[in-house]
């Protein structure tokens, strides 16, 4: 198997290529050919499918399928057994499809390499800001701009919870989550579409916390695997409310329950507080 640095170079190149392809559907020759369809309550477009094909083709051409398995949002079927290989690519070709359609610009591309259930390499491309975030386990998080400039990024060191900014969704905000957010000490909010965009806001020190709470559905592995490593290698944390880590490529690709991403400062305190508030809300409903 190639060295992780070689694999990262390939993934970064694929991330940039996928960004340019998505922008052709956003602005260019393909913008009037989105062919929007409903997929289990969420939209899917020809852009999702085209970028999915591009990413798979480029990765498989360069890395093959002997040592790597591949899971993507557009090819995953719940009836298919999960790959048993140690090394698995988990891919979301377009995180934030609704934002892509609505032209908010807040959509991202997620490419993660997972080993034994945990991410070891990650690329999050943010086409509309022309940035690509990348990280390897133990190697830090970096952001590359279109002109080739690369800088390391770190989360904020803010420690006063009351001064924290929570990054929230423009949609997908259920009543229970709204109640949890309303009871937290941090009241400032910043709205961003995709999960990759939310994590980018935290590593760019524009926000400090993101909370997800599943309802009838939950975030999937491809929503979180790549953003998680970008966050943690920049000094942040992403866990369940009870502090346990996320495990990927399990039988169920949904990440159920409450999740907290933060700048790492006061993370344990935020977990305890969120879990307490959730129990309080559920008891009120009884």
Image (cartoon, grey):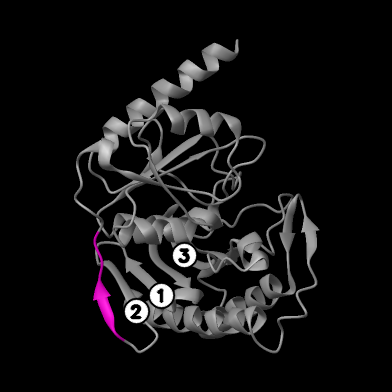
Disc on the earlier residue, 3 or 1:
3
Q: Residue at x 53, y 55 (%)?
A: 223
The residue carrying mark 1 is: 132
Disc on the earlier residue, 2 or 3:
3
- Disc 1 versus disc 2: distance between alpha carbons? 5 Å
Residue 120: x %, y % from top left: 37, 62
User: Considering the numbered disc 2 on the image, is that residue within a helix, a strand or a loop?
Assistant: strand
User: Considering the numbered disc 3 on the image, is that residue within a helix, a strand or a loop?
Assistant: strand
- Disc 3 versus disc 1: distance between alpha carbons? 13 Å
Residue 228: x %, y % from top left: 40, 55
Q: Residue at x 65, y 40 (%)?
A: 217
User: Considering the numbered disc 1 on the image, is that residue within a helix, a strand or a loop?
Assistant: strand
Q: Residue at x 32, y 67 (%)?
A: 136
Residue 216: x %, y % from top left: 67, 36
The residue carrying mark 2 is: 144
Using the rendered view, name the quadrant where residue 5 is placed: bottom left
Residues at badges 1 and 2 in contact (C-beta under 8 Å)? yes
16 horizontally vs 139: left or right: right
Circle 2 or circle 3, nearest the eye: 2
Q: Is residue 3 visible?
A: no
Picture layout, residue 211 above or below residue 71: above
The image's mark for residue 112 is 3
For residue 153: magenta?
A: yes
């Amino acid at each position: 198997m190639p060295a992780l640095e070689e694999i990262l170079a390939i993934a970064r190149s694929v991330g940039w290529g996928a960004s340019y392809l998505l922008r052709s559907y956003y602005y260019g020759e393909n913008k009037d050919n989105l062919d929007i369809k409903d997929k289990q309550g969420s939209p899917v477009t020809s852009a999702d499918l085209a970028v999915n094909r591009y990413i798979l083709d480029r990765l498989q051409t360069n890395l093959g399928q002997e040592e790597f398995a591949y899971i993507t949002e557009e090819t995953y079927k719940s009836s298919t057994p999960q790959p048993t290989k140690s090394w698995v690519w988990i891919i979301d070709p377009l995180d934030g499809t609704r934002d892509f359609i609505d032209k908010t610009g807040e959509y991202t591309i997620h490419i993660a390499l997972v080993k034994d259930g945990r991410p070891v390499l990650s690329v999050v491309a943010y086409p509309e800001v022309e940035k690509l975030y990348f990280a390897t386990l133990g190697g830090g998080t970096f952001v590359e701009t279109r002109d080739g400039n690369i800088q390391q990024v770190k989360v904020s060191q803010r420690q006063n919870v009351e001064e924290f900014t929570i990054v929230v969704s423009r949609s997908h905000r259920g009543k229970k989550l709204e109640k949890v957010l309303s009871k937290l000490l941090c009241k400032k909010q910043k709205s961003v579409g995709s999960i990759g965009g939310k994590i980018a806001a935290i590593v760019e020190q524009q926000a400090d916390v993101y909370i997800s709470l599943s309802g009838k559905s939950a975030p999937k592995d491809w929503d979180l695997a790549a953003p998680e490593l970008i966050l943690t290698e920049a000094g942040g944390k992403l866990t369940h409310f009870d502090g346990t880590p996320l495990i990927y490529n399990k039988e169920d690709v949904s990440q159920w329950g409450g999740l907290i991403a933060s700048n790492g400062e006061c993370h344990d305190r935020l977990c305890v507080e969120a879990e307490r508030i959730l129990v309080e809300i559920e008891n009120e409903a009884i």
